């Protein structure tokens, strides 16, 4: 009963499992007994990864069917990630047993930057632009225009842009610009990920690696964000992004099923 219940609802507390066991099976035991039983069955408590209820299995299958007509070498993944001072702090620290780990830190986020890379199986980070603030239709259109200059006609490598369903990604002006390139026989293509399916996008793993690099060099990055010029800040963020190796990129493609 316990294991079938947890398969359906894995985030029950021990006292909730105890009460369910009493109501449904007439067995009354302590929370400690519940814990020991779960541990003996190979279960441990882990950080919960939430899966969006809004995800559509049908749309995911449609995407898989469509994207499987391409090779990994053809696909370029594009997305934005926000960075500020809070991004540079590490999530864990050492402390004496029984005491909390503390560190003085900025609570005000300060200046916020948006990093917008293009991830390629062939080149790793093949292009990147950074702005202060957030991307809008005009700035994203400018990025795509630059990116198309690095791409090749389909079905060559680096010929298909893959993006999520962010509103500015699907703006008619953006799509029209890509189609206009097609009209010039450059043959670029565009595909969109299924909704709420970030696990299909290897660039999310690239962002995690970038932020790990920023946290490893947190003091220097925070100083750059506070005291240095825009150019030096952009160089610092670029350094974090381009620390990602081609081997890393290819392993992330494989991990995401490409």
Image (cartoon, grey):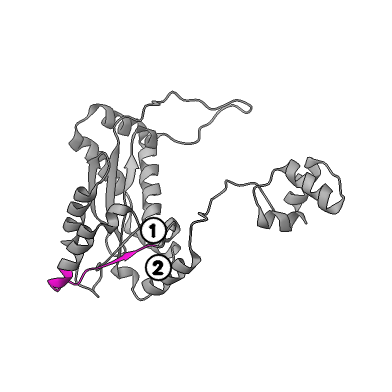
Q: Are marks 1 and 2 in contact (CB under 8 Å)?
A: yes
Q: Residues within 10 Å of mark 2 (few under 14, many from 20)?
A: many
**Residue 258, numbered label:** 2
Farthest front residue? 172
Residue occupying the point 33% across, 55% down: 245
Q: Disc 1 to disc 2, how far (Cα)?
A: 9 Å
For the magenta stretch, what is the residue range? 181-193
Residue 202 percent across, percent down from the top left:
39, 58
Residue 127 percent across, percent down from the top left:
23, 55
Which quadrant of the figure has residue 119?
bottom left
Q: Is residue 192 magenta?
A: yes
Quarter of the C terminus within the rendering:
bottom left
Nearer to me, 115 or 213: 115
Residue occupying the point 40% across, 43% down: 212
Q: Say if 180 sits above or below 21 in the image.
A: below
Residue occupying the point 48% across, 63% down: 56
Q: Residues within 10 Å of mark 1 (few under 14, many from 20)?
A: many
Q: Which residue is mark 1?
A: 202
- SS class of the residue under badge 1? loop
Residue occupying the point 37% across, 71% down: 67
Q: Is residue 6 left or right of residue 212?
A: right
- SS class of the residue under badge 2? loop
Q: Is residue 30 magenta?
A: no
Specify whether residue 150 is in view: no
Count of numbered marks: 2
């Amino acid at each position: 009963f316990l294991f079938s219940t947890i398969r359906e609802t894995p985030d029950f507390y021990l006292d909730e499992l105890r009460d369910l066991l009493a109501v449904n099976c007439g067995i009354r035991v302590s929370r400690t007994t519940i814990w020991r039983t779960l541990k003996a069955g190979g279960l441990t408590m882990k950080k919960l990864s939430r899966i969006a209820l809004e995800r559509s299995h049908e749309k995911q299958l449609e995407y898989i069917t469509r994207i499987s007509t391409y090779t990994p070498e053809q696909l370029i993944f594009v997305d934005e990630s926000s960075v500020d001072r809070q991004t540079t702090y590490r999530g864990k620290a050492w402390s004496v047993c029984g005491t909390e780990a503390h560190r003085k830190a900025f609570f005000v986020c300060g200046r916020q930057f948006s990093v917008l890379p293009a991830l390629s199986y062939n080149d790793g980070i093949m292009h990147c632009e950074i702005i202060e603030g957030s991307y809008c239709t005009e700035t994203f259109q400018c990025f795509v225009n630059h990116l198309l200059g690095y791409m090749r006609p389909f079905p060559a490598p680096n010929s298909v842009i893959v993006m999520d369903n962010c509103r500015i990604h699907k703006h008619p002006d953006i799509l029209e610009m890509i189609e206009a390139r097609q009209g010039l026989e450059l043959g670029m293509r565009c595909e969109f990920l299924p909704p709420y399916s970030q696990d299909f996008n290897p660039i999310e793993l690239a962002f995690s690696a970038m932020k790990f690099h920023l946290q490893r060099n947190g003091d220097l990055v925070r100083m750059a964000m506070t005291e240095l010029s825009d150019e030096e800040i952009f160089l610092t963020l670029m350094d974090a992004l381009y620390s990602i190796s081609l081997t890393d990129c290819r392993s992330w493609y494989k991990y995401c099923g490409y």
